[in-house]
Image (spheres, helix red, strand yellow):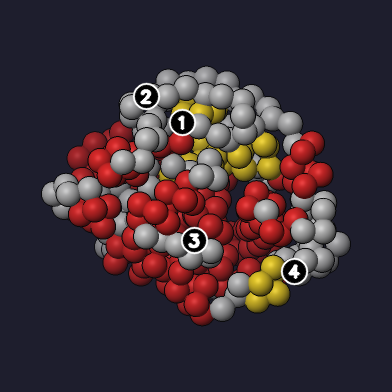
Amino acid sequence: MELNENAQVDTSQVDDRRGSGGGGGLGIPIPGGGGIVGIVIAVLVALVGGGFGLNAMNGGGAESGDNTSLTQKCSADDALKQLDCRNTLYVNSIQAYWRTALPERFGEQYQPSRTVFFSQGVNTGCGQADSGVGPFYCPADDLVYIDLTFYQTLADQLGAEGEFAQPYVLAHEYGHHVQDLLGTEAQMRRQQQRDPDSANALSVKLELQADCYAGAWAKNATGTADEQGQKIFKSITEQDIAQAIDTAEKIGDDAISKRANRPVNPEEFTHGSSEQRKQWFTKGYTTGDPKTCDTFGGSL
């Protein structure tokens, strides 16, 4: 993967709340929120020695951050050496893709979202969370949330060390934003209420669709550009895609359960097995078409 050093990093797509504080403790996952790993990451990290936790999400208001330092940093000549600037550029690419793909493939206009960078804890439209919940999308405020230290946890605790794991994670969360815009997420929640016994199976379908959407972005990422028309990526290699697939496999429900020395019970899966996550990311990447990501249309 090679980013274009001439591409402009649009920090307006990020809300930098790092250092604003947030809380701690072990609780439950976000109701209605989509995360790439969800509560299982908190369970795993607690068992293998990470130190993250998560708080119960009982509603609340989101707050704003100050992007001044991030904007200055990402305007410098060495911006792409900085983790937060690279991740901001990944967000720029993902949203540039959906601005075109959503109307072309689904006949709907794309409504941009921002990614919130936070440290340790954050107040959201879904309530208060801390880093242990992992990256997540909150449908109540239409924002993606991530503590960038998650990537170190991903590498150290789960063995997903590749650089392309990072844009894959963000593309998955923006897949949840697309589901929100299309009404898929709301429809799935209604189905869960009507049929509680199928709640986990429906959650798996939602998560696998977000993986597939991430794959569709990855296939088209080299065609994305900044507002001046500069390509954001110079290249994405097969090795990069292999890193994304490796990450998808490492965060399968079964893989995380095994790492945490917990029984593997498919009926408890909420995000999909390693094989399923690999399969659906690969389908999105192979076709490059998000319309093929119909995980709700039949058996997985």
Residue 290 visible in rendering: no
**First along the sequence among labels 4 and 1:** 4
Which residue is farthest bottom? 238
Q: Disc 4 to disc 1, how far (Cα)?
A: 33 Å
Residue where numbered disc 1 is placed: 130
Foreground residue, 205 or 103? 205
Q: CA distance from mark 1 to mark 3?
A: 21 Å
Type of the residue with mark 4:
Asn
Tag 3: residue type?
Ala
Q: Earlier in the sequence, mark 1 or mark 3?
A: 1
Q: Earlier in the sequence, mark 4 or mark 2?
A: 4
Q: Residue at x 42, y 20 (%)?
A: 58
Q: Earlier in the sequence, mark 1 or mark 2?
A: 2
- Residue behind mark 4: 4
Q: Distance of mark 4 from mark 2, alpha carbons?
A: 41 Å
Q: Which residue is mark 3?
A: 165
Q: Position of residue 195 (x, y in %)?
A: 25, 38
Location of residue 99 in the rendering, given as x and y in whole percent from the top left corner? 69, 57
